[in-house]
Amino acid sequence: MDDAEGFLRQKSQAVTESIDSKKWVWIEDKAEGYLSAKILEVNGETLSVEVNTGQRLTVKRDLTQQMNPTKYDKAEDMAALTYLNEAGVLNNLKQRYFSGMIYTYSGLFCVAVNPYRRLPIYTDKVVEMYKGKRRAEMPPHIFSITDNAYNEMLQERENQSILITGESGAGKTENTKKVIQYVATVAGTGETKSEKKQNLEDQIVQANPLMEAFGNAKTIRNNNSSRFGKFIRVHFGLHGKIAGADVESYLLEKSRVVSQTSEERNYHVFYQILTAADDQMKEKYLVTGKPEDYKFLSEGVARIDAVDDEEEWHATCDSMKTLRFTDEERGFLIKVVMAILHFGNVKFKQRPREEQAECPDTADAEKVAFLLGIQVADLVRSLLRPRIRVGHEYVQQGRNYEQVVSSVAALSKSLYDRMFKWLIARINKTLETKFSKNYFIGVLDIAGFEIFQVNLFEQLSINYTNEKLQQFFNHHMFILEQEEYKKENIDWEFIDFGHDLQPCIDLIEKKLGILSILDEESIYPKASDKTFIEKLKKNHDGKSPKFKLPKMSSKNKAHFEIEHYAGTVGYTVMGWLEKNKDPLNDSVVDLLRKSTDPIIASLFADHQPEGSRKKGSQFLTVSQLHKEQLEKLMVNLRNTTPHFVRCIIPNEKKKPGIIEANLVLHQLRCNGVLEGIRICRKGFPNRIIFSEFKQRYAILAPGAIPSGMFMDGRKAAAKLVDALQLEPNEFRMGTTKVFFRAGVIGRLEESRDEK
Ligand code: ATP
Ligand code: MG
């Protein structure tokens, strides 16, 4: 591994002062999270300590956390820590991070901290090192997770999934790409490439930059932020060779298409096309001007540091070529992008004393119509005076300025969204092969739990998703534990920790839950955000354990709160009904369905005009669609062996070498790592096989096991446990191992050190 090695595993342990964990504790600190402190004196439950800053303090013991002995420094698997507490976890991640070791296990989780610098740990040579190795044989790495999934798939003949979550900027997409890179390298078809024919593994790899051009954007948090979730399945044949792939996308952020905050951008592709257009593109697709010239780009910034949009466009085109897009298909994408930009520039005016808008200058509308393959007169008329169904008849209805501007925005967003879905479907078409598919590895790259100042419909959707994923994790962990306990014949009453999340999930998704009330209100003509809130209160206030009304003093003007596993979130109901209904100008949609460009005409094929939307009809609200997609994902995941990766953003400066303790602790809470530890502690997290137990701890009870006499492992272990006078609830005897509650091994270790 050469230079990679230092970043993965320490060659030699630095000599540090040996920590006697009895003499040191962690104490809470607002800025640093935890500070180490030396115990000077113990007075019952009160400790006087000297903090590493030199300051002396008196603290209650239960406000401190125990410190792990030095030998656990930079532990590769935190589940092995003697003291499994927040301070220990944070400290371990921090120490490893400062040494460039960004991956760490925590039981079933692999935690990855964004290094914000290129580390030499993803080369083909490193891929080679991880091939076929068991998890414990190699330093923690996303390659190890992937390789284990791959081998488990082949050995157990089971589908696998890798679930990657984390906040924006935490590194989910980078890690997703490493998973794909790994399987493409170790399980590629090995076909040689030629000018005309690209091999399948290249096509799978190239799908990512292409999706990023259309689905990623610069945000305050991340210069390349994915504004959609995705589940990529790579399919394999019986012998483990790649046999195809498909992608499912979730919830593209549509609002970005028409507006951005001042430090952000619209989707990358807009700037790529404007910067890179050659004469032919300019003429054919009406590409003119700079980002500042377009309303839908002018609110944000135009450039990203160290990114060359022109170069990026060439890369996007290369990806399209690799994925065998035709010129027409590429042209279609450019046309929609440019049509949206020109659409935003169409000027409307309000007629004085009339509830009617007009379009005095149709120059921009002409461009839109040209690009979309429709007639400009039809477009303008449909915008200003759409045909509305009233009973069985159609009538023309005038629209005022606000209505027209808002329907232009809705149409632009919808066009982009549908183009994006088309793009995904088109990628899938290339990645679909004739090879027989026996198994898959699915990689989920989806936004983690979000708690913002103001939490809207989007946050509820993403938090609901995470609630389901966390339940899936808890359930999986419980199944594994249960299997182990059963195998070892342990007396233990099983608790499925997945059930812990059910009340919250019910509150959101069950009959008369939040989403179904939202759907009901979305159909009812006189409903508003206000009536929705009232209905929520009526059904859930004081009735659902996870539903709360915010205290009057609440600053962020939330209307209701949900107690999620990761914390209580206040939600603000603003435009929820509109977002859920997602209304469109049906007259314009009808026009688009008759576009001379067949792909554009196909985009709205499944659109249902508003007048025909009824209860029980095929029309799905945004939340119903999401729920359906999520259910499909869960079914998919339940048929896999899951592997969990939690990405952590170390600081908000996008800089290497800085750990903001509170930011990291908050994420560990939200992403289930601490929840995993909590569950762990309820069972018997430490287990040691009999012979090892005897060998290591016999010294603590000399004479308990008669020397020179044969005694089978179980008997010897039982005698030793007896002699150590452990409480009955602190351990269980299995058939091959002794199981311990959290902390017991720590005590035994301390006594051993004293000997
Ligand atoms: P979002 O939810 O906004 O899409 P994300 O979790 O997908 O965020 P990434 O786009 O993967 O975040 O990472 C953000 C940036 O952090 C990357 O563009 C890259 O600069 C850096 N980064 C993340 N992971 C790594 C890594 N393993 N090595 C080097 N740089 C990384
Ligand atoms: Mg991303």
Image (tube, grey):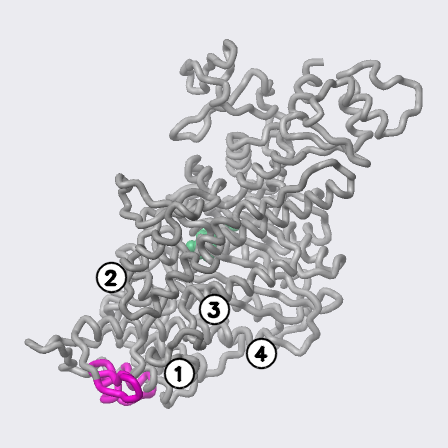
Residue placed most toward the observer, 250 or 529: 529
The residue identified by callout 1 is 600
The Cα atoms of the two marked residues, 1 and 3, are separated by 20 Å
Q: Nearer the viewer, mark 3 or mark 4?
A: 3
- Which residue is rendered at x = 48% and y = 63% of the image? 627
Inspect the magenta stretch and tell me whether residue 637 lies in it.
no
Q: Residue furthest right?
A: 709
State whether residue 483 is above or below residue 607.
Answer: above
- Does the image show residue 391? yes
Asked if the residue under mark 3 is in contact with the one under mark 1, i.e. CB atoms within 8 Å, the reply is: no
- Which residue is rendered at x = 21% and y = 73% of the image? 403
Q: Which mark is residue 210?
A: 3
The residue identified by callout 4 is 195
Earlier along the polypeptide chain: callout 3 or callout 4? 4
Report the side of 327 relative to 385 (left or right): right
Residue placed most toward the observer, 99 or 440: 440
Instruction: Give residue 341's quadrant in the image.
Output: bottom left
